[in-house]
Amino acid sequence: RSLVREALFNILGDEVEDARLIDMYAGAGSVGFEALSRGAAHLTFVERHRATLAGIAATADYFGATDRCTFVQADAVTWMRGNGSRIAAASGIVFLDAPYKDDGADTVLELLGASPPPLVVCEHHRERRIPEQIGKLVNLRKAHYGLTYLTFLRPEEEGA
């Protein structure tokens, strides 16, 4: 996992600096905290498990980053349907790392495709197929590391 995370941030480079990010299916929040350490302006952690989110909040407090974080205890699909697409469109980068067998990731990608942020990065198992286009998002790049893929999607250019 740390190899994939390092590769992710090497690919993103300076794009993380001063960006507003959403870490969907945040888990332990390691991607979000790495983004904060690399100069992200704000991180929204979306995690459905209350205890896991409490751990993320405690870590943010430990690092003195609570003022740069928003903690959302919700299922990613439910949150996106409620108000997430508006918030995602106002963000710079949405990182999506759903559990490998979670079909909700496809719905989240569809909702992001309807109101796309500047960049969506999806970490997924090689068996999960990400379409070349999802709504207004187009698949620009894939990088693979063993069984794990990183797929980068951006809004299609007008008239392209």
Image: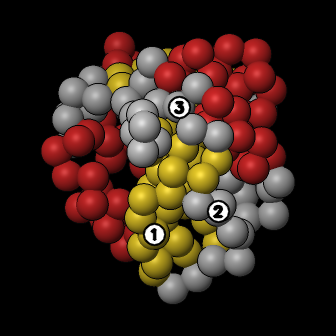
- Residue at 31% over, 64% down: 6
**Residue 24 found in image quarter:** top right
Q: Position of residue 110 (x, y in %)?
A: 71, 40
N-terminal label among 2 and 3: 3
N-terminal label among 1 and 3: 3
* Residue underneath mark 2: 130
Q: Amino acid at mark 2?
A: Ile
Q: Amino acid at mark 1?
A: Lys
The residue positioned farthest toward the front in the image shown: 159
**Do the residues bearing badges 1 and 2 touch, measured as CB atoms within 8 Å?**
yes
Q: Secondary structure at mark 3?
A: loop
* Residue underneath mark 3: 116
Badge 2: how crowded within 10 Å, few (<14), some, or many (20+)? some
**Residue 67 found in image quarter:** top left
Q: In 3D space, how far apart are the residues under numbered discs 2 and 3 (Cα atoms)?
A: 16 Å
Q: Amino acid at mark 3?
A: Pro
* Residue underneath mark 1: 142
In terms of depth relative to the viewer, which is nearer, 151 or 140? 140
**Do the residues bearing badges 2 and 3 touch, measured as CB atoms within 8 Å?**
no
Q: Residue 128: which numbered mark, if any?
A: none
**Do the residues bearing badges 1 and 3 touch, measured as CB atoms within 8 Å?**
no
Q: Is residue 3 above or below residue 95?
A: below
